[in-house]
């Protein structure tokens, strides 16, 4: 079935550093979504991508829809402490009926001690 | 515009009991989806409601059910609670059925003892 694999699982950041993470699947996706979740809160939609090769920015965040339609990338430039949290990729699951979202396991961003 | 609201935020129940969780979508959004989030399984889709009808269902037992009212507000019910039902239950709303951009509420943290 459809599965989303995120890497890395976790990473430590120092303020000012650029961060990169990615999401891959063995299946083709027509949409890629990136969410961020803070402790005790629900995921917040950061960026939505709808077209292969598309590059979309939201402030310091930039996400790309992979050309093969089986992957997506999220970059955060000049990280700040409030970037800490868990980042999820998601895409629509087409299994039997109208699609709904499946999620990767997340990339956890923490501050470097 | 107010976001998705969920009540209650925290709940403690005993094995065998039942529980009802409530979700109010963003004004104008007609589709409501429910997800279960656990450390082991991550975010998993439960079901989607649109126009007071369940449109899509994930792979959960029949103890999990839901409904949607004419004002798009939704409730989910879990009967005969098991310890493994302890999780964060998230509600997400979107403009229409099967829409990819879903906006999440803060969740209800359910603990079953």
Image (spheres, rainbow, N blue to C red):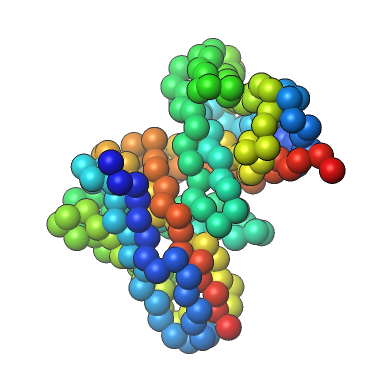
Identify the residue at image location x=50%, y=45%: A43
Vertical arrangement, residue A77 with respect to residue B36, above or below: above
The spot of residue B8 in percent (x, y) is 40, 69
Vertical arrangement, residue A24 with respect to residue A110, above or below: above
The spot of residue A45 in percent (x, y) is 47, 37
Q: Quadrant of the C terminus of chain B?
A: bottom right
The spot of residue B25 in percent (x, y) is 29, 51
Identify the residue at image location x=68%, y=28%: A79
Identify the residue at image location x=49%, y=82%: B13
Vertical arrangement, residue A102 with respect to residue B85, above or below: above
Q: Residue furthest right?
A: A113
Left-right relation of A8 to A35 = right
The reply to whether residue B14 is visible in this rendering is yes
Q: Quadrant of the N terminus of chain B?
A: top left
Left-right relation of B87 to B53 = right
Left-right relation of A37 to A24 = left
């Amino acid at each position: 079935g459809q599965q989303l694999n995120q890497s890395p699982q976790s990473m430590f950041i120092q303020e000012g550093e650029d961060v990169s993470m990615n999401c891959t699947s063995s299946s083709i996706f027509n949409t890629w979504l990136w969410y961020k979740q803070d402790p005790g809160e629900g995921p917040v939609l950061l960026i939505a991508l709808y077209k292969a090769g598309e590059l979309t920015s939201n402030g310091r965040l930039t996400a790309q829809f992979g050309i093969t339609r089986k992957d997506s990338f999220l970059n955060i430039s000049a990280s700040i402490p409030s970037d800490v949290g868990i980042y999820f990729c998601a895409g629509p699951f087409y299994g039997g009926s109208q699609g709904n979202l499946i999620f990767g396991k997340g990339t956890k961003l923490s501050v470097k001690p | 515009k107010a976001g998705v609201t969920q009540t209650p935020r925290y709940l403690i129940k005993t094995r065998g009991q039942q529980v009802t969780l409530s979700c109010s979508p963003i004004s104008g959004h007609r589709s409501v989806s429910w997800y279960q989030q656990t450390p082991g399984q991550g975010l998993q889709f439960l079901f989607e409601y649109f126009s007071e009808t369940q449109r899509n269902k994930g792979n959960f037992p029949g103890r999990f059910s839901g409904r949607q009212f004419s004002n798009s507000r939704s409730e989910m019910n879990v009967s005969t609670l098991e310890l493994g039902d302890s999780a964060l239950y998230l509600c997400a709303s979107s403009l229409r059925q099967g829409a990819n951009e879903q906006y999440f509420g803060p969740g209800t943290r359910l603990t079953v003892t």
